[in-house]
Amino acid sequence: MPFVSSVFRTLLLRLLALPLAVLLLTAGPGSARAVDTPSVAAASATPTAPASALVPPHSFVSQAARRVGESVVRIDTERSVARQAFDPALLDPLLRDLFGDPSSSSRERGQGSGVVIDSSGLVLTNAHVVDRADLVEVTLADGRQLDGQVVGADPVTDLAVVRIDASPDLVAAPLGDSEALEVGDWAIALGSPYGLERTVTLGIVSSLHRNITSLGFADKRLDLIQTDAAINPGNSGGPLINASGEVIGINTLVRSGPGAGLGFAIPINLARRVSDQLRTGGEVVHPYLGLQLVPLTARRARDNNRDPDAILQLPERDGALVQRVLPDSPAETAGLRRGDLVVAAANQPVRDPASLLEQVEASRVGETLPLKVVRGARELQLSIRPGALPHPA
């Protein structure tokens, strides 16, 4: 009996151990860890998100354009254009029958872009887009066409404000800060080039404070944003925005050249100041001195002074050289002469005509503006009172 009891007990222990052995052999390492670490089991049971779900569905460009897109409009204009009169006696009767009598005027159509800056119905665009327009039609982003009225325009800065009927769903574009821009920042242009609505192009800020006179526009006063974002005819007046979808400039012109085009925009900080005056029907007054200036550097002056045929000896300093004093101007009243070199204005150094113009723009009409002038070997302190820039005849 003791032998039988021993054998029975051994067999019973083996039978009890068999399921545990089978469990350990068939469960595998993963299941063994699952028994020991239930938290890991829960984590491994969670489905892994596909890699495509981690990538944003759209780029920052589309997000920025979407933010301001509802505020971008197309502007169509019509204007009367005088035609050269013909002497009917010089027209062959056959040509008169074919083409009819020539009219003294014709209708010219134009197109540009704009951006809503106030939900009350104010649209900012270029002055040249609505110049002399008899009819202004504004097409909103949703396709609605509204009559527009030019509230005011400033040809000097090429800015204009157009008013349309306000509606509850009219959205004003968010305005940024053009002074915060740096070369290399993203620049996105929106508008209707060649009539192609809702067009978006991408580039960077290529340069800042590009003086418009260097581009051949002597009648303008602008320091422009230069960009390589494609700006074409019809983009004029549309917004240039940053990566956040804020308006940083108003597209104004393009200069094409070999290889690529150069686009330019009016800084939004200047556009905001001018539009604040135009929106009430007010006139934008620009101070002026009545001078024609050319840049002078010390090196250029030395080269001139070494020339035995030089008309006059120039001060060998950097500054704005007076080439002409306009008659009956504040400059003539103050005693400025041809050949004077302006080296400081309002106690700020003047290194070229652009820096002098900056000080003049910051001054007020009728208030004294101190100038430091080099005349020959003498340095003079003059006081000048800027006048209001006359309108072109």
Image (spheres, rainbow, N blue to C red):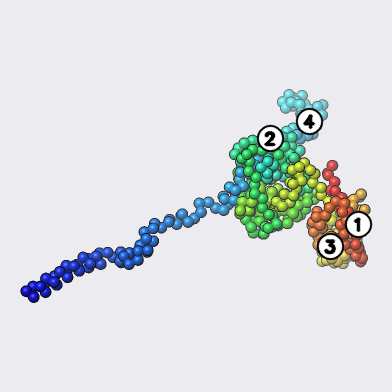
- Is residue 158 visible to the viewer in this orientation of the structure? no
How many labels were placed on the picture? 4
In three-dimensional space, the C-alpha distance between marks 2 and 1, rounded to whole angstroms, equals 49 Å
Q: Could you say which disc has been placed on residue 336 in the image?
A: 1
Q: In front of the other: label 4 or label 3?
A: 3
In three-dimensional space, the C-alpha distance between marks 4 and 3, rounded to whole angstroms, equals 55 Å
For the residue marked with disc 1, what is the amino acid?
Answer: Leu
Q: Could you say which disc has been placed on residue 147 in the image?
A: 2
- Picture layout, residue 96 above or below residue 71: above
The quadrant the N terminus occupies is bottom left
Return the residue nearer the eye: 277 or 358.
277
First in residue order: circle 2 vs circle 1: 2
Residue 75 position within the rendered picture, expressed as x and y whole percent measured from the top left? 67, 40
For the residue marked with disc 3, what is the amino acid?
Answer: Asn
For the residue marked with disc 2, what is the amino acid?
Answer: Asp
First in residue order: circle 4 vs circle 3: 4
Q: What secondary structure is marked by label 2?
A: strand
Q: Which residue is mark 3?
A: 347
Q: Could you say which disc has been placed on residue 104 in the image?
A: 4
- Picture layout, residue 153 above or below residue 382: above
For the residue marked with disc 4, what is the amino acid?
Answer: Ser
In three-dimensional space, the C-alpha distance between marks 2 and 4, rounded to whole angstroms, equals 27 Å
In three-dimensional space, the C-alpha distance between marks 4 and 1, rounded to whole angstroms, equals 47 Å
